[in-house]
Image (spheres, rainbow, N blue to C red):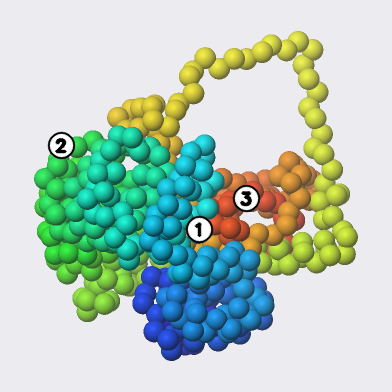
C-alpha cells in the first residue's frame, strides 16, 4: 500500500511511509517491488529522491534473511547500495549461520569491548541489532537467566544491560515486564528509551496495570516516560488507563503526552478527550495535537467541526516549508556547482572587522554556577533542567529523527565562523534546533537541517549565500526543519 501511494502521490509526499516500510512484514512480491523501485530511484536527483532511495534500501536490508538469501544476486548487484547498507546485509547473512552459543558469546564480548564507550553514538547499533535479531529465536540465554541478569546490580548502567533489554523486547519475553517497568524509576534517558521500545513489542497488559497503579505517586520523569509508553502498548487497557490518568494529571506536558497516546491508539473514546485538551493551553512544544487528531478522525469516520480550520493552518505551514526547502535546494545546487569549478563562494566575505578594544579592560566573571542536566531548572518549575528549559533545543531533533537526509553536503568548516552579514553580502545561517525563522537586518536564521550519514543523529551548522527569493515571515505554530 505504501508503494501504491508512492505511485499515486510521489515519493516526496510519502517519505514517512517509506521510512515505516521496515516495520511491516514483507512478502516476496513486496520485496521484489522494493528492489525494483530502489534501482529506479537511484537515478533520481534532488534531496527527496535521495531520501526515498535511502529508506527503500534500508527496508530491503531489514527484510527477512530468507528473502535476502533467495534474491541475493539482485540485491548485491545494485551499485547504488551504500556501504553501510551492504555491511548490514553482510552481517545478517553471516549471523544466520551462527549457533546460539556463538551469538550469545559475541553479544557479551561486544558489551565488554564497549565498556569504555559512554555515548550511545559510539556503539555500532547496526551490528548489535543484527546480532540480537539473530539470537532472539534461540533460548540462549534462557528466560530465567535473562530475568536474573536484568535484575542483577552487577550489570547496571552497562551496555550489556541495554542489549539484554533489547533482546527481551525482540524475543517478547513477558516475564521481564515487571523488571522493565521498575527501571522507569531510574532517570537514565537512553535506557528508558530502550525499555519503552521493548515493552511496546512485548505488549503485555501487565505493564499498563503496573504503570496505572504507580503513576499518581511517581516522579515527573517517571510519569513523562510512561505517559509516552502507554500509547505504544496496543491493548484495550492502555486506552482505559490514559483516560483515567487524564482526570487527575495537571502537568500540561504529561497531559499532551497522554493525549498523543490516545491518538496513537486510534481511540474513538479519546477523540472528544483530545478535542477538549486542544481547547485548553496544552503544551504544543511537544506535539501538535491537531495534526495527530486529523488522520485519526478521518480513519474512524468522525467529522470534526474544527477540521477545516486545522487543515488551512496545516496548508500554510506546508507551503512555507516547501518554499524554504526549494530555497535550500537551490542554494545547495549553486554551492556544489561553484565548488566543482574551484570557486569558493565565501571568499569575498573576508573576516569581519574587529571592534577597537577599550583602553582599559576588566575581566568579567560569571558567578552563577552552570546548570547541570540533572539539576533543578532555574525557571522554578520544579523539574530537572534537561526535562524543562534544557530540553527545548532537542524537541525538533526528536520529531524529525526518522526523517534524516541520506547524505551530508560538503561544507568548509570555516563557513560557520564567517560573519552572518556584511553590507554587500547576505548569508543564510543554520542555527540551533528550535529557533524559528526570523528576519533581522536583511539576514535570516533557519533551523538546522538533519543530515543522514551513518545514523539519523548527525546535525550540522551551515551557511549559504542568500538567493533572491526570500523566506516569508515568521510561520504560524511550530516550524520544523
The residue that mark 3 highlights is: 460
Question: What kind of element bears circle 2?
Answer: helix
Question: What kind of element bears circle 3?
Answer: loop
The reply to whether discs 1 and 3 touch (Cβ–Cβ < 8 Å) is: no
Question: What kind of element bears circle 1?
Answer: helix
Using residue 397 as the reference point, say whether residue 305 is left or right of it.
Answer: left
Q: What residue is shown at x 14% (from left), y 48% (from top)?
A: 210
The residue that mark 2 highlights is: 217
Marks 1 and 3, how far apart at CA: 25 Å
Q: Position of residue 468 (x, y in %)?
A: 72, 63
Of labels 1 and 2, the one closer to you: 1
Q: What residue is shown at x 26% (from left), y 61% (from top)?
A: 172
Res 229 quadrant in image: bottom left
Q: What residue is shown at x 49% (from left), y 84% (from top)?
A: 70
Disc 2 packing (10 Å; few <14; some 14–19; many ≥20): few
The residue that mark 1 highlights is: 127
Marks 1 and 2, how far apart at CA: 40 Å
Lower sequence index among marks 1 and 2: 1
Lower sequence index among marks 3 and 2: 2
Using residue 105 as the reference point, say whether residue 221 is left or right of it.
Answer: left
Q: Position of residue 349 (x, y in %)?
A: 82, 47
Rendered image: mark on residue 41:
none
Res 43 quadrant in image: bottom right
Disc 3 packing (10 Å; few <14; some 14–19; many ≥20): some
Amino acid at each position: 500500500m505504501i508503494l501504491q501511494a508512492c505511485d499515486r502521490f510521489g515519493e516526496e509526499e510519502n517519505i514517512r511511509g517509506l521510512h515505516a516500510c521496515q516495520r511491516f512484514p514483507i512478502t516476496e512480491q513486496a520485496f521484489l517491488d522494493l528492489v525494483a523501485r530502489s534501482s529506479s530511484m537511484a537515478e533520481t536527483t534532488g534531496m527527496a529522491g535521495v531520501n526515498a532511495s535511502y529508506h527503500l534500501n534500508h527496508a530491503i536490508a531489514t527484510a527477512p534473511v530468507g528473502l535476502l538469501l533467495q534474491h541475493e544476486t539482485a540485491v548485491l548487484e545494485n551499485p547504488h547500495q551504500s556501504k553501510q547498507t551492504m555491511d548490514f546485509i553482510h552481517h545478517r547473512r553471516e549471523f544466520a549461520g551462527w549457533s546460539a552459543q556463538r551469538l550469545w558469546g559475541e553479544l557479551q564480548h561486544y558489551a565488554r569491548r564497549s565498556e569504555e564507550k559512554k555515548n550511545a553514538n559510539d556503539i555500532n547499533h547496526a551490528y548489535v541489532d543484527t546480532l540480537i535479531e539473530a539470537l532472539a529465536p534461540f533460548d540462549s540465554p534462557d528466560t530465567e537467566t535473562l530475568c536474573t541478569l536484568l535484575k542483577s546490580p552487577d550489570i547496571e548502567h552497562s551496555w550489556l544491560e541495554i542489549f539484554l533489554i533489547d533482546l527481551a523486547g525482540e524475543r517478547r519475553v513477558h516475564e521481564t515486564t515487571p523488571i522493565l517497568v521498575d527501571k522507569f524509576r531510574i532517570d537514565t534517558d537512553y535506557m528508558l528509551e530502550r525499555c519503552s521500545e521493548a515493552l511496546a513489542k512485548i505488549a503485555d497488559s501487565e505493564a499498563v496495570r503496573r504503570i496505572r497503579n504507580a503513576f499518581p505517586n511517581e516522579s515527573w520523569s517517571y510519569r513523562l516516560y510512561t505517559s509516552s509508553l502507554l500509547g505504544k502498548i496496543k491493548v484495550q487497557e492502555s486506552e482505559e488507563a490514559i483516560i483515567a490518568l487524564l482526570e487527575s494529571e495537571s502537568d500540561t506536558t504529561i497531559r499532551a503526552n497522554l493525549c498523543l497516546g490516545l491518538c496513537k491508539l486510534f481511540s474513538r473514546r479519546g477523540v472528544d478527550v483530545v478535542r477538549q485538551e486542544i481547547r485548553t493551553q496544552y503544551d504544543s512544544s511537544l506535539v501538535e495535537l491537531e495534526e495527530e487528531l486529523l488522520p485519526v478522525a478521518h480513519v474512524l469516520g468522525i467529522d470534526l467541526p474544527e477540521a477545516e480550520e486545522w487543515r488551512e493552518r496545516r496548508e500554510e505551514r506546508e507551503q512555507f516549508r516547501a518554499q524554504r526547502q526549494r530555497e535550500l535546494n537551490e542554494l545547495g545546487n549553486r554551492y556544489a556547482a561553484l565548488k566543482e569549478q574551484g570557486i569558493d563562494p565565501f571568499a569575498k566575505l573576508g573576516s569581519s572587522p574587529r571592534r577597537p578594544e577599550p583602553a582599559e579592560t576588566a575581566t568579567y566573571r560569571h558567578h552563577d554556577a552552570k546548570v547541570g542536566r540533572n539539576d533543578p531548572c532555574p525557571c522554578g518549575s520544579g523539574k530537572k533542567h534537561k526535562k524543562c528549559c534544557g530540553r527545548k533545543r532537542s524537541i525538533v531533533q526528536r520529531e524529525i529523527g526518522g526523517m534524516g537526509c541520506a547524505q551530508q553536503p560538503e561544507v568548509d568548516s570555516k563557513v560557520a565562523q564567517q560573519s552572518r552579514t556584511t553590507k554587500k553580502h547576505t548569508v543564510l545561517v543554520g542555527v540551533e534546533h528550535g529557533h524559528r525563522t526570523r528576519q533581522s537586518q536583511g539576514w535570516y536564521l533557519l533551523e538546522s537541517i538533519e543530515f543522514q550519514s551513518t545514523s539519523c543523529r548527525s546535525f550540522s551548522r551551515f551557511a549559504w549565500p542568500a538567493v533572491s527569493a526570500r523566506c516569508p515571515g515568521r510561520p504560524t505554530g511550530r516550524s520544523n526543519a
